[in-house]
Amino acid sequence: MIKQNRADRVLDALKDMGLSQMLIVDPMSIYYLTGVWVAPFERFYGLCLRADGRHAMFLNRLFHVPGDVGVEKVWYSDTDPVTDLIAEHLDRDAVLGVDKDLRASFLLPLMEKKAAAGFVNASIAVDRTRGVKDEEEQELMRTASRINDQAMARFRELIHEGVTEKEAADQMLKIYLELGADGFSFEPLVAFGANAADPHHAPDNTKLEPGDCVLFDVGCIKDGYCSDMTRTFYYKMVSEEYRKIYETVRRANEAAIARIRPGVPLRELDAAARDLIAGEGYGEYFTHRLGHFIGLAEHEYGDVSSASAWEAQPGMIFSIEPGIYLAGDTGVRVEDLVLVTADGCEVLNHYPKKLEVIG
């Protein structure tokens, strides 16, 4: 059934863009708006939202979508001219907002048929709406992050001398499932020692050695919503230099979080973390943006970076994940998810950030 409050927010965003209709084809966005999940592969699957309420969902007869979804269902077979059917449900005299994911094989025929008065990329109307979570979504995100906190405590117990990154990673799914998660939100990143200097290192057969850092960047999915958290530990001992690096990253994480409140430009959060790291002499080793938006997808539209033009708004959920990466030596990242509230923020992760030496 269409989630009217979300659809109304998209329509309001379209109105602000001077648009009265949009064709949405991203399956995750359609799920967000209707609760219907379809994996269309090469076939057309779309939701047309119109300001006059004449919404329509376009469905191949191979798709299994039973019951009332709150909008007109337009069925077609593999031999039907699907773009003709789409055109029949559009206002030819109005500009059509299109999804950035709409394939040229469908868009070009619609343009050739002059199915609308013009065509513009209106994805931002959906992307910005999804970026601000409603209360139902906020609670689902809390639940997913709660499981992730519990999982991190279990993952810590996987650390022992001689274990390989892959051996640790291979045990994580079982732990998530035992804790009630539905699966990974992304494949876990497990990195020991110098491998942690690669922010996206895939677990391999590297064995843990005394003095190594242990970086776990992990997340699960629960009831459709994703979690994401990074913690960095040390095995048996930590040098003074590594301690300084860790504390610098932790302080950068906390400095950015302390600035979060409605109206603050997201680029200022990035600057708060980046300036602190640069002040300790590691500026060139913080090599990525501070954070990304998250929800139904592990990486959603929107980021926390020096290039962001957005301001914090209540309901936004994004990561704060500064890092320092010394190639061939070590790497540290500390990541939390945060929810912007009416007067600040709520940190969704509660696993401690105090430096831990294990073993």
Image: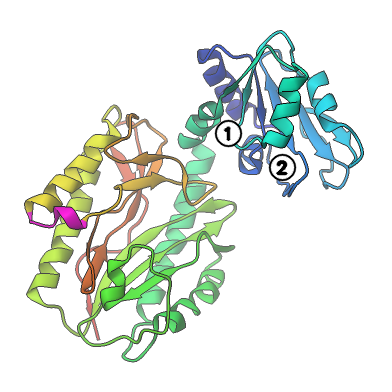
Colouring rule applied to residues: rainbow
Say whether residue 281 is magenta. yes
Mark 2 crowd level (few <14, some 14–19, many ≥20, 10 Å Cα): some
Q: Residue at x 54, y 40 (%)?
A: 136
Q: Residue at x 23, y 52 (%)?
A: 253
Amino acid type, mark 1: Lys
Q: What range of the chain is rendered magenta?
A: 280-285
Say whether residue 49 is magenta. no
| Residue corresponding to mark 2 | 36
| Residue corresponding to mark 1 | 100
Label whose residue precedes the other's in the sequence (1 or 2): 2
Amino acid type, mark 2: Val
Q: For numbered disc 1, what is the local secondary structure? A: loop
The reply to whether residue 55 is visible in this rendering is no
Left-right relation of 230 to 25:
left
Left-right relation of 293 to 327:
right
Tell me residue 41's x, y (percent). Answer: 73, 49
